[in-house]
Image (cartoon, helix red, strand yellow):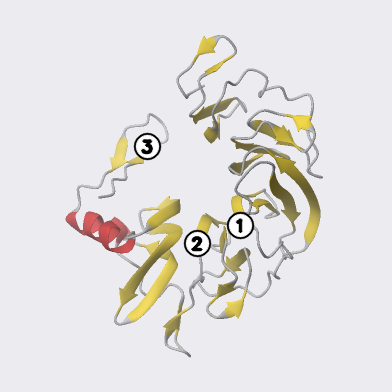
Amino acid sequence: SYNFAILNRANGSVAKSTLSTVLHTNLENVFNAKAMSLHYVDDNNIYAGGLFGYTINGKQIRNVIKFNTDFVIDEDYMYDTASATYKSPNAIVNKVILNSNNELFIAGNFTQVGGANHSKITKLGSNGLVETSFSNPSITSTYNVQGFALDATNNVYAIATDPSVTTTPFNATMYKISATGTILNSEAFTTNSNYFRVIPSGNDMLLFGGYTKYGTTYTNRITKLNSTLQVITTFNGHSGIGAGSISAIVRDANNNIYVSGSFSGYGTTPTKGIL
């Protein structure tokens, strides 16, 4: 069973809950495996990515889906009338982000979308079909894109890890990719964790997860990177976070940072996973 609640931004009160029978039924039917990412635009535009399959009129849609009001499935999204099939990714989608042009960036461990080669990161148009203006960035074929974010000019920031490595040190690469799919910068490094996420922070990026080092720099679970993916050493938010990992970050209007996760405290202050 899956329970979602959409909250008012101002005070955190519930704006839309899962009391609707239709909503609850469709969540059960679609997410029969696991959903990794939701992108909420408004009540008529909700996008989900993950590892799942769903059959519509005898045709299967996989790993990306769009919902309208009350999570009713948009049956036209990703449907190609010429082939009478849904053009779905062939493997897990870890992140979905909609840009200001109603184009959906997807990232994960897929190598194809709709049977064509589109590996790890691609862009879908407003109809859900691959947008060819975004070329395939050359991300290592065995890597899985975990963290993914867009900046104000639609540059892509992605963190990819090697899932075939199951013990430390893990291999990872941080990428900055242009709005057309060209890799602008990349930084390969080894780390003691294979869990990462990334969000924009003004002109910079915040990388976070369960690691303690970004390359050779001790940055303990949260790192601020500049536009060329180098560590901003004046950012010391990592200095007191205890053992565990950071799972989520939000920033307020003054760029104060709020984090949550499984960590035990900050310095000598026990914070029970929220700071």
Q: At numbered mark 1, what does the secondary structure look like: helix, strand or loop?
A: strand
Q: Residue at x 80, y 34 (%)?
A: 216
The residue at which mark 1 appears reads as: 144
On the picture, is 179 further left or further right than 23?
right
What's the residue type where badge 2 is placed?
Ile
**Relative image position of residue 78 (x, y in whole percent):** 46, 74
**Vertical order, 116 against 261 (above or below):** below
| Residue 92: image tag | 2
- Residue 57's quadrant in the figure? bottom left
Task: Report the residue that reaches farthest toward the left.
Answer: 21
Question: Circle 3 sits on which residue?
Answer: 8
Q: Give the structural element (helix, strand or loop) at label 2.
A: loop
- The type of residue carrying mark 3 is Asn
Q: Position of residue 98 (x, y in %)?
A: 54, 57
Q: Tell me whether the residue at label 2 lies in contact with that at label 1, contact meaning CB atoms closer than 8 angstroms.
A: yes
Q: Residue 237 location in percent, x, y? A: 66, 23
| Residue 147 percent coordinates (x, y) | 60, 48
Which tag is nearer the camera, tag 3 or tag 1?
1
Q: Is residue 37 left or right of residue 119?
A: left
Residue 88 sits above or below residue 267 on the image: below
